[in-house]
Image (cartoon, rainbow, N blue to C red):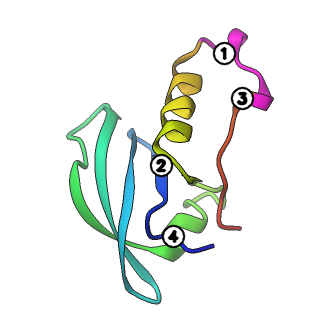
Amino acid sequence: MGLVGKFFFHCGDEYMHSGEIVEQVDPATVLVRTDKCACNSAPPMGMQLVRISEMITDNLGEPGWEFFGTRQELDDYWAWIDKPSEEKTEAAAPGQTLN
């Protein structure tokens, strides 16, 4: 899967953020632009270099990043995340992982 131009959602230990993958810097690293964050700490907004290996699994071996082809798909995912758990359905949980 080519990552440049994809939109991402990342759920970390202290925050959830999303944005767009804007450039592949080298075979192992991409440049991402974060434009939305739901945080308990300072938001990781702006541009960041991220190793692709970090996008595959988190420190517990779970996929930590979801990828979307369009901004609308990402916005729909945020809407799904914001719903109370009793209103969520698995069919409404889109996104691709890298594993």
Q: Is residue 89 magenta?
A: yes
Marks 1 and 2, the one that precedes in the sequence:
2
Quick one: label 3, few (<14), some, or many (20+) residues within 10 Å?
Answer: few
Of residues 58 and 84, the one drawn nearer to the viewer in this rendering:
84
Taking the image as shown, residue 96 lies to the left or right of residue 26, namely right
Cα gap from disc 4 to disc 2, whole angstroms: 14 Å
Query: Magenta segment range?
Result: 84-91
Callout in the foreground (4, 2): 4
Q: In this picture, is 99 found above or below 62? A: below
- Residue of label 2: 10
Cα gap from disc 1 to disc 2, whole angstroms: 19 Å
Q: In this picture, is 41 found above or below 69? A: above
Pointer 3 with pointer 2, Cβ within 8 A? no
Quick one: label 1, few (<14), some, or many (20+) residues within 10 Å?
Answer: few
Q: Which disc is residue 3 wearing? A: 4
Residue 81, percent from left and from top = 56, 26
Taking the image as shown, residue 86 lies to the left or right of residue 3, namely right
Marks 4 and 2, the one that precedes in the sequence:
4
Q: Is residue 29 magenta?
A: no
Query: Amino acid type of disc 2?
Result: His
Residue depicted at x 26% and y 64%? 48
Q: Which disc is residue 92 wearing? A: 3
Query: Amino acid type of disc 1?
Result: Ser
- Residue of label 1: 85
Marks 4 and 3, the one that precedes in the sequence:
4
Tell me the SS state at disc 3: helix
Cα gap from disc 1 to disc 4, whole angstroms: 30 Å
- Quarter of the image with the N terminus in it: bottom right
Residue depicted at x 48% and y 52%? 8
Tell me the SS state at disc 1: helix
Cα gap from disc 3 to disc 2, whole angstroms: 17 Å
Marks 1 and 3, the one that precedes in the sequence:
1
